[in-house]
Image (tube, rainbow, N blue to C red):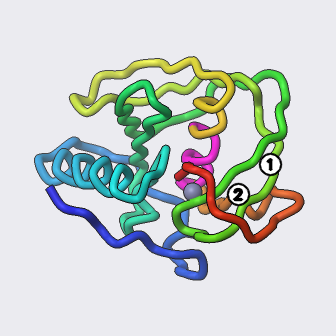
Amino acid sequence: MAILPIYKDGHQILRKKAQPVIKITKKIEKLIKDMLETMYDANGAGLAAPQIGISMQLVVIDVGQGPMVLINPVIVKGSGKSVDVEGCLSIPGLIGYVERFEQVTVEALDIKGRPYKVEGEGFLARALQHEIDHLQGILYTDKATNITKEVPVNEG
Ligand SMILES: [Zn+2]
């Protein structure tokens, strides 16, 4: 496994739409493991592949419930509204308040390519939306109000 460099805001790959994963190869399995290691090393709660310079629809999340791998994730349902603070490993030193769905249902493939569904609320729902935005080339600062310089919270 390896800790990968995290691309920072201003790099154009963060603004590209990520490509869907067609086949889960050994290389992709290794990449997912490296993404998890990179996320834990950076004390993040989530990481999307564009953040390590790979324009593919891969996300890893750990909000304290263990590692979650999402390949080709899609939000199929969102409900409620919540405004809370976010930071991003690609935008160090800043935080901002973002309105998100309070609850989301996400469909994705796991590391074995099996389809599954995640129903998340609160911080997990926020992390899912933040990371899936990365796959669309969207950064939280596009949506945030009150962006301030502070110690970043643990979020991808
Ligand atoms: Zn982020």
- Location of the N terminus by quadrant is bottom left
Q: Which residue is mark 2?
A: 140
* Mark 1, secondary structure of its residue: strand
Instruction: Name the one closer to the observer, 147 or 17.
Output: 147
Residue 92, above or below 120:
below
How dense is the environment of label 1, judged by Cα within 10 Å: few (below 14), some, or many (20 and up)? many
Residue 105 picture quarter:
top right
> What's the amino acid at mark 2?
Tyr
Magenta stretch contains residue 134:
yes
In the picture provided, is 38 more to the left or to the right than 126?
left
Task: Indicate yes or no: mark 2 CB to ligand 1 under 8 Å.
Answer: yes
Classify mark 2: residues with Cα within 10 Å, few (<14), some (14-19) or many (20+): many
Image location (x, y in percent) of residue 28: 21, 50
Tag 1 near tag 2, CB within 8 Å: yes
Image position, residue 101 (x, y; %)? 76, 31
How many marks overall? Answer: 2
Residue visible at 34% across and 72% down in the picture: 5
Dot 2 lies on which element?
helix
Query: Residue 63's x, y, as percent?
Result: 49, 34
Quadrant in the picture for residue 69:
top left
Q: Which residues are magenta?
A: 128-135
Viewed as shown, does residue 65 lie left or right of 37?
right
Q: For mark 1, what is the residue?
A: 98
